[in-house]
Image (cartoon, rainbow, N blue to C red):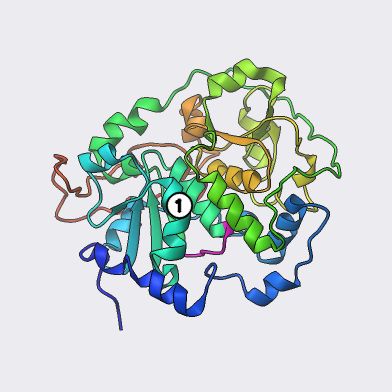
Amino acid sequence: MVRNSIFSHPKKYLVMGSLFLMIFGLECCSHKEAEQQNIRPAGNESQTLANWLAQNGNYIASDEVPALISADELFLLRDSNVLILDLRAAEQFASGSIEGAINLPADQVASYFSSRIDPPSFSKIVFVDNRGQLSSYVASLMRLLGYDNVFSLRFGMSSWNTVFAAEGWNKVIGNDLVGKTDFTNHPKRPKGTVWPTLSTGAKQPAEIARLRVEKLLSAEEPSFLIDYKEVLKAGDSMYLINYWPEDQYLAVGHLPGAIQYSPRIAWQPNEDLLSLPVNQPIVVYCYNGQHAAHAVAYLRLLGYNARSIIYGSNAFMHNTLQGEKFVPANAWGEVHQHNYPVVSGVSAPETKKSTEIKAAKGGC
């Protein structure tokens, strides 16, 4: 039997999880207890966690990453069993939101999943924010815990309605570094044997992961975002990663000193993971910051001091991303902007009777 839409009955599902979890004692939605028990602690918690993730599919290196959903796709799902969790501040949420969305601060996400809902009962759980980076970060952390039905709204509320785009993505695209990028192929650090130091005190990797996610989503945790101008000023004091395919890295240039790491491929324990410094800030940037936010969530989970550039390459070489070497999903533009309805008093342009699907696939 198909459940009623969360868009029309959002409160109905809030208490389902508590009863379900008390009966079955589930910790997360997909990692099997037997698999957890068969993982023996490695040299330290970070290595233990990396090995466990690798043996359980390692979302960050899978074809599922980045788990993004477009505004078009979400709009077409409005009458289905989808839960929308809006991570924005309360005043932003009150100014206008997607019908049926629930306002939930990031620091409450972990407890909400474990004690207030039954996550597997929803076909999709979609995180929403302003730009699509916080929601990507949170979605990645929850995916790494095993919740494989979570997604992030691509480009955030800017993609849902032009009212938000006018004050959001439309204001931040920039081209200051077009024609000024670095074309040097900078080598990675040699692979080492040192892992970040974690000390949750937990014995099993699933418990280490849960405690790490709770900490990373806590209100006192430093922001995972950084402005590209701050990165340029920092110079060699930061380990800067270009998170593009190698052919694009070489063909159109990159931020000065940036080192190319291949999306999905790099973050396996036997690949480039141990080339990362453990005592130096790491900055990862992709096209629009959303895939990088997923990667940074993984790195921070393991204990690396990693951050993501706000708005990605769109902040400093937007026009370049509209070239033939890139796909439409890489650059913010008209194809991503819609006039889908909002509630709570936001005056939005009327939605066209015949919805034009403008989905841009691929990339981050």
- Taking 354 as reference, is 123 left or right? right
Q: Nearer the viewer, residue 261 or 273?
A: 273
Circle 1 crowding by C-alpha within 10 Å: few under 14, some 14–19, many from 20: few
Identified at 75% across, 38% down, the residue is 276
| Residue displayed at 86% across by 45% down | 193
Which sits in the foreground, 20 or 243?
20
**Image height check: is 299 above or below 285?**
below
Residue in front for this viewpoint, 295 or 260: 295
Looking at the image, which is closer to me, 255 or 228?
228
Secondary structure mostly seen in magenta is loop
Can residue 166 be seen? yes
Q: How many marks?
A: 1
Q: Give how far across and how far down residue 349 sits, in percent.
A: 15, 41
Residue 178 visible at all = no
Asked if 282 appears above or below 44 in the picture, the reply is above
Q: Is residue 3 magenta?
A: no
From this viewpoint, which residue is outermost toward the bottom? Answer: 1
Amino acid bearing label 1: Lys
Asked which quadrant contains residue 39, the reply is bottom right
Q: Position of residue 176 (x, y in %)?
A: 49, 18
Q: Which residue is mark 1?
A: 361
Element at label 1: loop
Left or right: residue 347 versus residue 20 is left
Relative image position of residue 36 (x, y in whole percent)? 68, 70
Start and end of the magenta stretch? 144-149
Residue 88 x, y percent position in the rendering:
34, 42
